[in-house]
Image: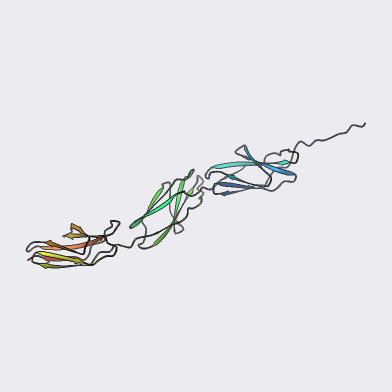
Amino acid sequence: SQPVSVTVQNEYESIVSDIYIFSGVDTIQLNWNSLYGAESYKIYRDGTFIDEVSEPTYTNVTPGGIEHCFEISAVNYVNIESEKSDIICGVALLSPPSSFNASLNYENIILSWTSVNNASGYHLKRDNSIIWSGSNLNYDDSDLNFETIYNYTVSAYDFQDTIGAFSGAISILTAPEILPPTLASAITGTTVTLNWTSIETAETYRIYKDNLFISEVNNLSYEIDIGIGIESCFTITSVNSFGAESIFSNEECITGS
């Protein structure tokens, strides 16, 4: 018989190219052009094989804020693997803080959140505008108006200053301004009777005599003996549930006889 010459192809010369990388929250997605003759593709991350897929796309679930570098090779129908592609690197986006809280303290809103792994810092938005950036896990917002709704969100950013996903919004209605009452006075002999108007948001009222605090009450009147021939001047303030005190009322000056 005549000899038969057989050539065995033991190399797969095609190389994966045109790789596109997309960063999502805690994910990195790779897409590339399919190769003729490829039955599957092998994925390498940071030099280590991690998976084999049949389609020219792959999503790697990985914590945000860490850079990973990928290579892809093709495998043909006889299980021959091509050379690896060029290296392409990417960073998954950081997830938002798992907990985000706000509390009202009369003229300011105190916001706090939990830390995010691999975060370099955080961005805080009020009504869709960034009002603060830093590494702390809390912020005291005092640039506010009374009786106004504010919406807050927070996100983390990574070592490249790439902003991650923002949290869900927290809505806070600020308190009404605490106003002073209107004060009136009357005297019988040396006994002064003070009366003042009710303030809806007041829990108590503070009484001042000659600019010195003398008492705090929760009603709308107060009596005091001031002695004969002595002029005394009184003012009142309102105090709300936050412990915030209003400005002084009008002043009432009176002399005992």
Residue 250's place in the image compared with 34, above or below, is below
**Closer to the camera in the image, 74 or 163:** 74
From where the camera sits, is residue 141 visible?
no
> What residue is shown at x 17% (from left), y 65% (from top)?
194
Number of labels in the image equals 0
> What residue is shown at x 41% (from left), y 47% (from top)?
137
Quarter of image, res 210: bottom left
- Residue 3: percent from left, percent from top: 89, 31
- Residue 48: percent from left, percent from top: 62, 37
Q: Which colour scheme is used?
A: rainbow
> What residue is shown at x 41% (from left), y 52% (from top)?
101
Quarter of image, res 148: bottom left
Q: In this view, does 35 lie to the left or right of 193?
A: right
**Closer to the camera in the image, 2 or 99:** 99
Q: In which quarter of the image is the N terminus?
A: top right
Q: In which quarter of the image is the C terminus?
A: bottom left
- Residue 138: percent from left, percent from top: 40, 49
- Residue 10: percent from left, percent from top: 76, 36
